[in-house]
């Protein structure tokens, strides 16, 4: 048997190592993101940062001369309110659309709708923000009589449209994963499609649908440009859908440019980043575990 | 459904009020779900249509090729357009090899183990990190720690890491769709693992990989937050018509950033200008995505195995 040439063997080994290196790159990047974001905020985090004030105070006065406060509760409330409204709209519509695509459509229509949803998902967030600013803003003022149209309602609708595609596509996967024998058994008993969906498919696919919703939440919480442009800039806890708010993400985007490097303010913004990182990580991992659980069953 | 109960075909099965109610419920459900679906399709059409109508007076070749003038209140979008192209191409060059090789590792070199599960989770996680956190990371790691400074390079690196999961996911899917028999045949004639990957697996999944790359392009072109603090600036004067106007360590303008700037930061911008910018950005992204979709449909139609 002919031996391989030495260079060939070396290339093979080298390439294998390169591939391994790239393989673990995702892990490196995730830890790198945590490390570098935390690193920028760490010196203040360990010296003087008041985590209780950060989580419970609504006083966000980062650039005040005498009364500097870093209370992020209003920002958290901003993120929560916009996300909540977005989910109230996106979940029923997303799951409804997933049901329609998976159960009521013929092949051609299905293809068409999936492409449309993919294109909807592709619209850049800054364009969504621009739509919020130029289309939704005057529309909301006109319809509700609110003094300003950049508010929770505006951001919520925009975020709903942005997170609906992911809910539809994951939700449709979940419905598709329900074995056809379930459907056949139901139809053999003479139930209608609607009864089948309501009594059989939804209970059977509920984990997958939950994962879809979680991924939608993750998307909505992390969205930056659209909420920056569409929710107004009022740091306060909203009392109605027509109040302007500011989210965690928008705060970073709006203030990082003005905060001097390594100042307390600058470091607090990085701590907000860590909070966002942990928040979305929890949501995404939960969704991933649920999906994986379904697949292994 | 339109046949009456007395017609011969349904004579045996009289429609009771129960079945009729069932059918009504079914019909109502179908219509409601259809409506819900349409309410998602309609915004896309309306948005694109509205933006194009508003931008129509300004759209021309000159709009693309002129640099912004008079404090971005006149002229075209050449400098941001060029900046976006730089960022996209550079991030593509960085992300593609790493992303493809990472997928090769996951699909060809590793067995199902706790380690690959961790890698897969990391990919999922990376895809879910908010874009503004990527911006913080890019600022902390590339701009400050690595001393690259705010530059096209730092912004592209940030974009590359952000968009890598897209490439990994679609490459993995493409690799997984190559039948095992192809690999076994190759191993049987004495090829090594890398030779198999290089000459059999990759060529057979190249179009799937290409789809991922195209989607990466669309994603990278549209992102604003990650480049905001790592390399994109509000305004930078460049020479009109020059293609190599930016250097690797220069800051640059970008389309997405430009749209944000002229729609929120600059007063008295003529009405059509931001619309024109939005249409160019949206048009590019949708066009690139359509390309990926067409490629995928074409692939599915000619798959031989």
Image (tube, rainbow, N blue to C red):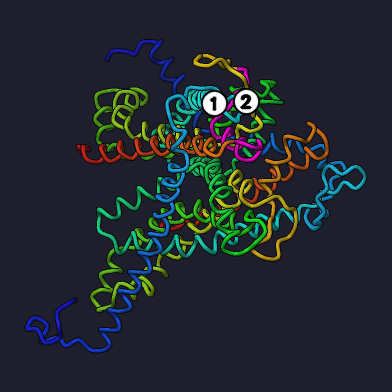
Nearer to the camera, A155 or B122: A155
Lateral position of residue B111 relative to residue A32, left or right? left
Q: Is residue B140 visible?
A: yes
Q: At x 34% / y 53%, what residue is drawn? A: A113
Q: Which mark is residue B70?
A: 2
Q: Secondary structure at mark 1?
A: strand
Residue under pointer 1: B75
Tell whether position B267 is magenta.
yes
State the image coordinates of residue B134 (x, y, percent, origin top left): 61, 37
Nearer to the camera, B191 or B48: B48
Q: At x 59% / y 34%, what residue is drawn? A: B257
Lateral position of residue B140 relative to residue B258, left or right? right
Picture quarter containing residue A53?
A: bottom right
Q: Is residue B301 above or below residue A21?
A: below
Q: Is residue B118 visible?
A: no
State the image coordinates of residue A100 (x, y, percent, origin top left): 35, 63
Nearer to the camera, A34 or A14: A34
């Amino acid at each position: 048997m002919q031996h391989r040439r030495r260079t060939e063997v070396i290339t093979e080994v080298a390439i294998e190592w390169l591939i391994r290196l790239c393989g673990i790159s995702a892990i490196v990047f995730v830890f790198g993101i945590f490390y570098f974001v935390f690193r920028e905020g760490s010196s203040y985090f360990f010296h003087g940062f008041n985590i209780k004030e950060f989580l419970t105070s609504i006083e966000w006065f980062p650039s005040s001369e005498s009364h500097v406060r870093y209370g992020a509760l209003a920002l958290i409330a901003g993120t929560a309110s916009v996300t909540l409204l977005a989910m109230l709209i996106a979940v029923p519509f997303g799951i409804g659309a997933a049901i329609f695509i998976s159960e009521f459509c013929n092949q051609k229509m299905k293809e068409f709708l999936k492409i449309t949803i993919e294109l909807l998902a592709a619209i850049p967030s800054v364009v969504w923000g621009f739509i919020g600013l130029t289309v939704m803003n005057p529309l909301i003022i006109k319809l509700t009589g609110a003094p300003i149209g950049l508010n929770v309602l505006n951001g919520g609708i925009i975020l709903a449209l942005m997170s609906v595609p992911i809910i539809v596509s994951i939700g449709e996967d979940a419905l598709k994963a329900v074995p056809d024998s379930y459907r056949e058994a139901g139809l053999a008993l003479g139930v209608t499609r609607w009864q089948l969906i309501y009594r059989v498919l939804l209970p059977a696919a509920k984990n997958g649908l939950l994962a879809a919703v979680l991924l939608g939440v993750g998307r909505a919480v992390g969205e930056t440009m659209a909420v920056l442009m569409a929710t107004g800039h009022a740091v306060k806890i909203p009392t109605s859908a027509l109040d302007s708010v500011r989210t965690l993400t928008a705060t970073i985007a709006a203030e990082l440019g003005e905060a001097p490097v390594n100042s307390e303010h600058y470091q607090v913004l990085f701590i907000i980043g860590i909070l966002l990182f942990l928040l979305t990580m929890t949501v995404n991992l939960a969704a991933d575990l649920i999906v994986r659980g379904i697949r292994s069953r | 459904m339109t046949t009456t109960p007395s017609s011969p075909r349904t004579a045996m099965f009289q429609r009771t009020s129960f079945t009729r109610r069932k059918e009504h419920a079914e019909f109502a459900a179908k219509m409601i779900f259809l409506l819900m679906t349409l309410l998602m399709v309609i915004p896309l059409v309306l948005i694109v249509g509205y933006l194009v109508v508003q931008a129509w007076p300004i759209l021309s070749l000159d709009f693309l090729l002129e640099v912004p003038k008079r404090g971005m209140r006149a002229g075209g979008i050449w400098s941001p357009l060029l900046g976006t192209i730089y960022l996209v191409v550079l991030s593509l060059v960085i992300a593609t090899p790493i992303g493809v090789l990472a997928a090769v590792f996951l699909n060809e070199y590793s067995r199902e183990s706790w380690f690959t599960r961790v890698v897969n989770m990391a990919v999922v996680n990376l895809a879910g990190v908010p874009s503004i956190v990527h911006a913080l990371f890019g600022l902390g790691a590339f701009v400050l720690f690595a001393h690259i400074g705010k530059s096209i390079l730092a912004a592209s690196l940030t974009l590359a890491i952000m968009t890598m999961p897209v490439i990994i996911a679609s490459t993995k899917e493409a690799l997984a769709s190559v039948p095992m028999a192809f690999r076994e045949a190759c191993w049987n004639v004495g090829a090594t693992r890398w030779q198999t990957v290089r000459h059999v697996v990759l060529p057979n999944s190249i179009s799937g990989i290409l789809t991922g790359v195209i989607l990466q392009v669309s994603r990278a072109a549209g992102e604003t937050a990650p480049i905001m603090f790592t390399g994109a600036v509000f305004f930078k004067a460049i020479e009109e018509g020059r293609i190599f106007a930016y250097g690797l360590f220069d800051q640059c303008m970008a389309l997405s950033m430009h749209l944000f700037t002229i729609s929120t930061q600059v007063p008295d911008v003529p009405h059509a200008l931001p619309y024109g910018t939005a249409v160019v950005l949206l048009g590019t992204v949708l066009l690139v995505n359509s390309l990926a979709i067409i490629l995928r449909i074409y692939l599915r139609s000619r798959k031989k195995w």
